[in-house]
Image (cartoon, grey):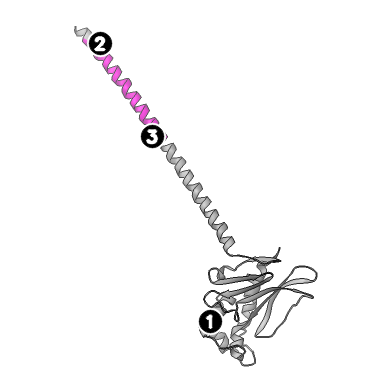
Amino acid sequence: MWGGHGEQSASTQREHHASAQKSGSASTHTKQQDNSNKAKNDGNAKDESKNTKKQQASEDIAQYHVTAQSYEFDLPKYWRDRVIAQVDGDTVTILSKTYPDTENPVCTISVESGTLTYSGGDVATSIMGYVPISSDHHVEVWAHRYPALAAMGGIELKSDEEYTDLTDLQSGGTVDFITARNNTDAGGESSDGAIFIIDDWMKNNLISAITVR
C-alpha cells in the first residue's frame, strides 16, 4: 500500500509539473503575442502619424500656393495667414488680411508684353522685379513704397496702423513704417535708404519664387 501510494504521489507530481510547464509555456506565448501586437500597434500608430504629417504638409503647400494663368508661386512664409491673394487670369493682387484695401495692396503681379522693364515707376511706386516668360512676355511685380508715399503726400491718408502693417509685410518685418517715413523728405529722398529694403526683400522672398507654368 505504501509503495502504491508513493507511485501515485510521484505520478501526481509529474502531472502537476507538466501542467505547470504547459501553463508557463502558454503564459510566455501570450506575453510574446501581446508584445508582438503592441509592436504592430506602435508601428501602425507611427505610420498613421507620418501619413497625417505628410497630408498636413501637402495641405499647407496647397493652401499657400498661388496659381495664375501663366505662372505660380508659394507665398513667403512671413505672409502666411496674413495676406489674401486675389487671382484674375494673369493678374495677382496681394492684400493684407487685416486691411484688405484694393487701393493699397501689398503688391500687384501681372504679365506684360514687350521689352523687359528693368526699372519703372518712381520712388513712391515702382517695379520690384520681373520674371521672363518668353521672348516677348514677362511677369512684373509692382509695389508702393508706403513710407515714401506718406512722406510725399501722394496717397489718401489712411491710418498709420494700415501703412505699418503693409510696410511690415513688404519688408518681412525689417522696416518700420513710422521710422522710414520720418527719414524720408517730401521729395522722396530717404536719409537711411530704408524704403529700398522693401525691394530687396520682395526680390529674395517673392520674385525668386515665381515660376513659369
Q: Amino acid at mark 1?
A: Glu
Q: Which residue occupies the extreme bottom position in the image?
A: 186
Q: Residue 162 got which mark?
A: 1
* Quarter in which the N terminus is drawn: top left
Numbered disc 3: secondary structure? helix
**Residue type beneath disc 3:** Lys
Tell me residue 162's x, y (percent): 53, 81
Q: Which residue is mark 2?
A: 7
Above or below: residue 46 compared with residue 120: above
Give the amino acid type for the residue marked by disc 2 in the picture.
Glu
What separation in Å lies between label 3 and label 2 (alpha carbons)? 36 Å
Do callouts 3 and 2 mark residues in contact (Cβ within 8 Å)? Answer: no
- Residue 138 lies, with reference to residue 49, above or below; the image says below
The residue that mark 3 highlights is 31
The outermost residue toward the front is: 88
- Cα separation, mark 1 vs mark 3, equals 66 Å
Residue depicted at 69% across the width and 85% down the height: 122
- Crowdedness near tag 2: few (<14), some (14–19) or many (≥20) residues, C-alpha within 10 Å: few
The residues colored magenta run 5-33
Q: Per the image, is 52 magenta? A: no
Label 1 vs 3, first from the N-terminus: 3
